[in-house]
Every structure is written in structure tokens, then in C-alpha cells.
Amino acid sequence: MHVAWLIGLLALLVPVASWSQETSDRWPMSEVEALRLVLGEHPRLAGPQKGVDAAQRSVDGSDATQPWLFSASAEYTHQDRPIRDAFSRGMQIQDSFVWSVAFAKTWEFGLELVLALDNTVSRSETPLVLALNGAEVKQRRLTGPFNFSVLSASLTQHLLKGASQVVNSLPQQRAELELSAAQLEVARQRNQVLYEALTAYWELQRAEAALELRRKSVGYVRQQQEIVDELIDAGTTARIEADFVEQQLVTAQDAVALAELSRDLRELELRQALALPADEQMKILPTTPMSVPAKRQETLKDMTTEVIETSQDLQAARQRLAMQELEVIRSAEETEPTLDLTARIAQQGLDDQLGLSDGFMLDAYRQIALIEFGAVSFGAIFSMPLDNDYAEAAAESAEIEYTKVEAEVKLLENQTALRVASSYRTLDSTHSRLALLDKSVDLAKRNLETGQERYAAGHIASLELMRLQEELEGAEVQRLNTQIDLVLRDLELDSLSGRLLERFGVVEP
């Protein structure tokens, strides 16, 4: 008994959870004051069946990281109520102190174990009015402290609980999904930086290639000017051609100056966009000088952004799909039967003597009350939830939402796969176009060589030779732009389909 009081006093160290004072409906003149103290995450377990509720939080995954759940509580109640009968008249005082501790653990497949210890210590003080020798004697009778302890163990098996392992693993899956989303965001930002750096790099290469082409044009024009200077004495036509060539020379020099300025600007943009270490720069920056028009670069950039957004939508949809799967499993759990095996050991006794010991009846009552007794009980409870329209409707709604999200995920996967397939088809088309442009450049070179031979023989004029040179230059520019498109398409597919899409399980066609 003293041990029970000691444990109860230790519970007083717990912070005060609530204080209440109320008036009983049955006894209008009585007052009840209660001081409730709670330690732990769960309320006081009032019996082994209530322990199932305490362990349920571990089943649904909210406490999956805690191997054992602990709960402790203490409650003190003081009550004053009027009493009036043949032997008592006045205010009766009742004090009670209740404390409890419980441990709960949950295993896979719906197996739950709850160990609970409840102890109640109570005392009462009743006013007595006895008629002795024709006179009333008023005394107060103290009863108690009266102790009642219950140690209970409850083992519950949720039948048809094959999905519990999935339920317990869902919090870990949720954390993995959140981590995957964070990694996706980091990868998206890095790919965006790399793409902007590549864009600036290709612009710089385009400017350098254009500058080189302009310098070649200046060289061709100077050669033509030298040839025309030799033919100045031939007549007025040669003088007109010389003036025309001089104008082309000035125009070409201006184009060279503009190309140099554009190259400097692109180099500045590259330095601003590419904030990576030197070894990383060597990994991502090719060495082949190529160029790409600005409009085509904007188109590729928009397509890259759209594919990245589609990948993010796909990841978010799969997260919603996992969450909806959790809701479906939770809704289905409400209709599952359970089997509860309970063992209880109870002890109760009266340690203190009565306040009034005179008289045979009171002595006999005291002897009976001082007898301590114990009890051991076992029980098995099989529970089958009845039809619950609300739970069934919630489960059906969760399944419908799950089907909807699953269809959305499949739609996004198909869109992403179609986009990747379209990029591959565009890449194949670019390869074919590049092969045709290579043939066009070779043909333009042969025409220029033939034209130079005919010009040396005096069969064609210098204007015809200049036209052949311009055709060769135009063919080289077209081939250069096509090579840029080819490299950017290849980089895009390697960055998106190879790094991002395979993470989501999208199979490349």
C-alpha cells in the first residue's frame, strides 16, 4: 500500500494538465474539484481494451519510428456532497487519487501488445449520528485509504491485416518521396544553370564562327580587288567592278567589327552564366566551334523548360498517388475484424482502521473490510464491425480518387514518353538534314574550284566568281547551324531523358 502511495506521489512531479470545479447534477449542493496530471503522448488507459487505441497510432504509421509507446497519468478528485439517512446527516467528503502507466508496442500484420497498470486510492469521511442511551452522538467516520490495483495485458490481432506492413512503411515512403522531390528541384536548378551556360557558350561559338567567316569574306574580297586592279586598264566595266568590290570590302570590314563586338558580349554573358569550377566547365563545354540562331535557341529552351515541368508534374502526381493509397488502406481498416486476448490481475484491500470502533456491528464490519482479496481473469473478444455506410462511402471515395490520380500519372507518363519520342524523331531528322548539307557544301566547293579555273581562263567575270563564293559561304553557315541543332538536341536528350526521366521510371522509346 505504501508503495502505491509512493508511485502516486511521484506522479505529482508531472506538470498540471487541467483543473476543474463543477457542480453535480444529482447533488445540487455538492462540489467536485479535480486535479488531472498527464505524462506521455496518450490519455490514461482505463483498462486493457482502451490500450488498443493507444497502440493504434503505431499501426497507422504516425509513431512508426518509436518501438514502444509510453503513457502515464495521475488524477486527484475531491468531492463534498450532502448526505442524510438514518445514521448520517451532514456533508460527506470523498477523496480519490488515480494513477496509471501503460506501455504499447505494435508489430507487423496488425499484432498489438498493451501492458497497463491502474491504481486507485480512495478515502471517505462520513458524519455519523448515533442514538446511545437516549442521546444523539455526533461523530465522523473515516474509511480508507481503500486501494484497488489492476495489472492488465492485452494482446490484439487485427484479422485480415496483410496490408499493415504496407501501412507501416508508408511514412518511410513519404519521406523518400519528399527527398526525391528535393533532389528533383536541385537537379532542375542545376540543369537550368547548365543549359543557360551551354546557351551562352554556343552563342559565343556562333559569334566566333561568324567572325571567322567574315574574315574569310574579307580575304576573298581582297583577292578579287587585286584581280580587278589588274584589269582596270581593260575599260570602264573593270572600274565599275572595282568600285563595287571596294564597297563590299568596307561592308565586310564593318561586319567583322560587329562580329568582334558580338563575340565580346557573348563571352561576358558566358562568364556571368557559367558559375562552375574549371573542371566542371571542361566536362560540359564542347570544343567544336558551332553556332545557332537566337530564335532556335529560344525554341529549344522553351521545350527544355516544358519537359522539366512535365517531369515535376509527374513526380507530384506520384506523390499524390502514394498518399491516396494510404487513405484507401486506412479506410479499409475500419471494416476489418479483430481478436483480443486479455489477462487481468486485480488486488484490493483496506489498510486503515475505522474511525469509530465501539460496538459489535462496527467491529464486525472492520474485520470484513480488512480482508484483502485478489482476482485473475482471462478473456477473449472477437469483434466484427457492423455495416458503416459512412466508412464504406469514404473507402469508395478514396478508391475513386486513387483511380483518378493513377490515370493522371499514366497520362503524364505517356505525355513525357511522347515528348521524348518526338525529340528522338527530330534528332534523326537533323542527322538527315546535316548529311544533305554536307553534300551541298561539297558541291559548292567543287563549283567554286571550277569557277576559279574558268575565271583564270577568262571565261567568266569576277561577279560570277563572287556569287560562287557567297554560295559556298551560305552552305557552310547552314551546315554550321544544323550541327549546332544536332549537338543541342543530343545534349537535351542526355540531360532530360538520361538524368531526369529515368528517375521516374519512364522508358525511353
Image: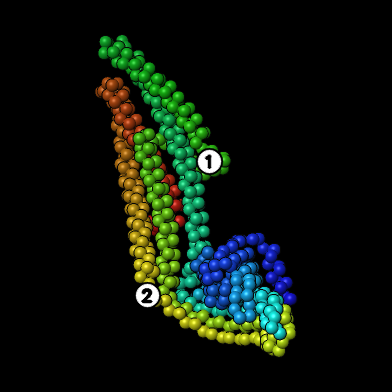
For image coordinates 28% across by 13% down, the residue present is 240
Residue 446 image point, x, y percent: 31, 34
Q: Secondary structure at mark 2?
A: loop
- Mark 1 and mark 2 lie on one chain; the one further toward the N terminus is 1
Residue identifier under label 1: 281
Residue 404: quadrant of the picture = bottom left
Q: Quadrant of residue 393?
A: bottom left
**Is residue 498 or residue 410 the one in the foreground?**
410
Label 2 Cα neighbours within 10 Å, binned few <14 / some 14-19 / many ≥20: few
Disc ID at residue 505:
none
User: Is residue 258 depicted above or below 421 in this figure?
Assistant: above
Q: How is the model colour-coded?
A: rainbow
Is residue 336 in view? yes
Report helix, strand or loop for mark 1: helix
- Residue under label 2, please give it: 387
Residue 358 sits above or below residue 435 on the image: below
Q: Nearer the viewer, mark 1 or mark 2?
A: 2
Residue 373 percent across, percent down from the top left: 66, 86
Whole-Å distance between the Cαs marked 1 and 2? 66 Å
- In the image shown, does 415 or 245 lie closer to the viewer? 415
Residue at image position (66%, 75%) is 127
